[in-house]
Amino acid sequence: MSRQLTATLRVARGAAGEAPRHDSFEVPFEDGASVLDALVWIRGHVDCSLAFRYSCINANACKECMVRVDGKVGYACTERLQSGVMTIEPLANKTLIRDLVTDIVPPKERLTAKRDGD
Amino acid sequence: MARFSTDVLIVGAGGAGMYAAISAARAGADALLLDKSLIGRGGATIMAQMTVAAAVGHQEPDHWTHHLRDTLEAGHRLCNEELAAILCEQAPARILEMDGWKTGWARHGGRMSQVMAPGHETARCCYVDFLNTGPAVSRALRGEVARCDGITRASGLAVIELLVRDGRAVGAVALDVESGAAVVIDAGAVILATGGLTRLYARNSASLNMGGDAFALALGAGAELIDMEFVQFFPIGHLAPRLVGMDPIMWDPFRYKLGGKLLNGDFEEFLHNYGASDSGTYTARRDVASYAILKEVEAGRGSPHGGVWLSFEHVPAAELKAAFGPVIGRLAENGIDLTKGGIEVSPIAHYHMGGIRVDAEMRTRVPGLFAAGEAVGGANGANRLSGNAIPEAFVFGERAGRFAAAEGLRLGRGDAADAADAATRALDAARAQCRPGRTHGGGALALMGELQDLMWRQVGLVRSHDGLTGALARIREMQRRDLAGLDIPDDAPFNQALVDWFDLRAGLVAAEAVALSALNRTESRGAHQREDMPEASPEMERNQTVALQGGRMVTGWAKVPRIDYSLREKTAAVL
């Protein structure tokens, strides 16, 4: 049977141009849970203002949830939670939007670019 | 306020939405393809791992009328037979067209591989190896969308209201997820293609954006829904040990291919006790298998996590390796070794048979408003045949795009004079609740969690009058009281909590439609099982409709659309 464990997630917060900070969250989890599980748990239980992208929920199909876990790039849905402290940050090579959300939208899928001239 | 215009607005960019956009562009219309998330990344299509039913006859002789017979049989006499016939007749053309867009259907010696799946009498289901059908299909459609000049793509726009003027759909108000601003889109015609509502259940195989948006938008615009009580529970959704990086319904093709055994907590086969012959043949229909698993667990014969065992232990390791291919490695990363023991499975909300009521051209009763894909109700009756969801996305998407293009070009683009006011009003519904500060708790997402638990317990696999009545009361209380009391953090950019609030608002409307319809259907049929009324009633061989009247949800009954058809001779594809 699964054991009940606790992880501490240090999550990068803030929008582009703001002073970067990290918020810490204590997250209960069972063996095998993913970083995405923890982020979803934080939004639903502690702080719904935390921003990150995902769509397919742990199937690794949508490929939207890429972040840095302890400095290493990976999908939040396949990175496993571990007891102790884990640091979750946005991709470093993409423009930051807010918290863990970066600009990964393909340029041709942006309606906003044409907005003023429309 | 940003404002755009298009001939055809397509809401939702999964398989149905992308196909609709391609088809609308092909018919000479400008198409604007929106998604809350990224184009061709969210929704159900990309999650599909197997199987795509189409009578192409590449492995065994086949004819679409036989596919139709199997579809109608699975649907417990509630299928809209006209829609079901369109689905089966046109599926082969769509599969072959997708082949031309380099989907990469699995092949054997030049012929497309087709396998058996439960409820089919013939090896009819195409796929892409290994467990890659959905991603491959999505990639092919994204590529074709990109090649169509007539299509404009827009990621990160959540449609929160349709614009209706003089009884006609003329566009939509969307929330720009990144900026938090309202965007107005004037359109000649609108296609709703945001999929089903399985996210409203605690255990589901859905993407985040499958929370019933299309149903709330359609009702709000004056369209009808049909058969909302029929939610399909996939019998062997993964339960334990924790599996990440895989679709929870991944076991199906392997169970078929290898004859995986379903065993209860006492390690005994049990499906035969529920009228299904199954061992080694895997022919039990989804509704029967789900029901049997639930009853075993109820009787205290479940597995440790409250499901049953799926075991491949009787299959030689070499055979496992050949069938699972690289998937064996991904299972190992999850600590699963199929030669050493079973895994636990249990039913999981998977698909919605009900949906928006449309005619054969995918039109709702609101001029200018169309639907496509899982958002459409009727074709699959009370229980969907396995393999029919993806062809439905393609076939209905292609039709919706084609007919909406003609309609949009004929009627001309909307230009509602009061669009700016409408946009402000639509957004203010939530904006008034935005609060500064940093402590917000779970907000709308927490309430969504409660709704998911409620739907799972009381509007799920086995229902009763009391459970449904209680659920309906709580859903309406959430709508009228709790929703308006939620604090929304006043963040920007990318205020996901604001999207959560609109998701919840739509989800509650969809949930109310399911609970109300389930309460009215006083019988058990297909995916709708009533503990207090275990038999099917001949008098209830009717479709149930849902509409809004003066802001209230009202239901009605309609005759099942039937067609005359005869089985035609099966033929093999000539290559």
Image (cartoon, coloured by chain):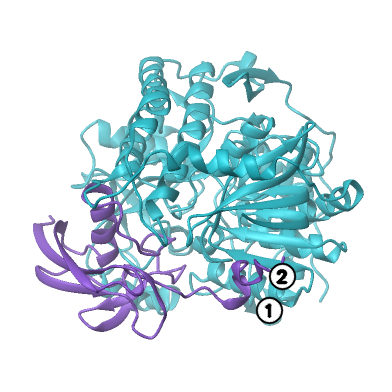
SS class, disc 1: loop
Q: Residue at x 21, y 49 (%)?
A: B439
Chain A drawn colour:
purple
Whether residue B192 sits left or right of residue B473 in the image: it is: right
Kindly indicate the quadrant of the structure image that contains residue A95.
bottom left
- The residue at which mark 2 appears reads as B98
Query: Residue B355, image x and y in percent?
Result: 62, 37
Kindly indicate the quadrant of the structure image that contains residue B122.
bottom right
Labels 2 and 1 share a subunit: yes
Subunit ID for the residue under disc 2 = B
SS class, disc 2: helix
Q: Residue at x 58, y 66 (%)?
A: B39
Query: Residue B186, image x and y in percent?
Result: 74, 51
Subunit ID for the residue under disc 1 = B
- Which mark, by number, is residue B102? 1
Whether residue B199 sits left or right of residue B21 in the image: it is: left
- As rendered, which of B277 and B446 lies closer to the eye? B446
The Cα atoms of the two marked residues, 2 and 1, are separated by 7 Å
Among the chains pictured, the one given cyan colouring is B
User: How would you rate the neighbour count of disc 1 (Cα within 10 Å): few for under 14, some for 14-19, many for 20 or more?
Assistant: some
List the single residue furthest toward the right.
B410
Q: Is residue B533 visible?
A: yes
Q: CB under 8 Å between callouts 2 and 1? A: no
Query: Residue B342, image x and y in percent?
Result: 26, 59
| Tag count | 2
The amino acid type, in three-letter code, at marker 1 is: Lys
